[in-house]
Image (cartoon, rainbow, N blue to C red):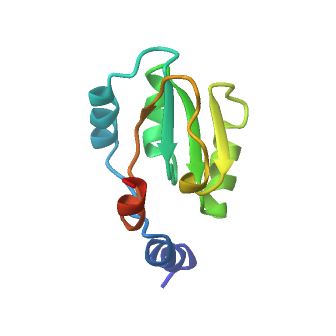
Amino acid sequence: MSRSLSRARRARTTLSQNFLVDARAAAMIVRAAGIEPGGLILEVGPGDGMLTRHILAAGGRVLAYEKDPHYVARLRRRYGGNDRIRLYHADFRDVRAPRDPFAVVANVPFGITTVIGR
């Protein structure tokens, strides 16, 4: 088993991750969200950034909360120069919502969905 494959399997088990890999599905999710240019979007668990790139392409501003340090590093390398995204190495459940109006667009890790609803 390759190192990256074993790492992906381990991440899915420990962090309840299920990665969105279909770019058309990601684009459809973002279109359905009705993102306005400049609109503030909270993205929970962006992982490799499949939704992130479509949100940014739609003109949204992103507050992304990623718990996995591997993906935090990848996203920082990819979007470090983009002033419309702020990436936080944090568990979304431990942060306060912004005061400005926002929408949530996410492929939420299944293991935290019941906790988010509380």
Q: Nearer the viewer, residue 8 or 84?
A: 84
Q: Nearer the viewer, residue 111 or 11?
A: 111
Identified at 31% across, 48% down, the residue is 22
Q: State which quadrant residue 72 falls in.
A: bottom right
Q: Is 3 situated above or below 99?
A: below
Residue 75 place in picture, x, y as percent: 63, 47
Q: Nearer the viewer, residue 115 or 109?
A: 115
Residue 118 place in picture, x, y as percent: 39, 55
How many marks do you count on the picture? 0
Identified at 62% across, 25% down, the residue is 84
Q: Is 86 situated above or below 47?
A: above
Name of the residue lying farthest toward the top = 37
Q: Is residue 99 left or right of residue 36?
A: right
Q: State which quadrant residue 54 falls in.
A: top left
Name of the residue lying farthest toward the front = 118
Residue 99 place in picture, x, y as percent: 58, 27
Q: Is 9 situated above or below 23?
A: below
Q: State which quadrant residue 26 falls in.
A: top left
Identified at 47% across, 27% down, the residue is 102
Name of the residue lying farthest toward the bottom = 1
Q: Nearer the viewer, residue 74 or 37?
A: 37
Identified at 49% across, 31% down, the residue is 41
Residue 7 place in picture, x, y as percent: 54, 76
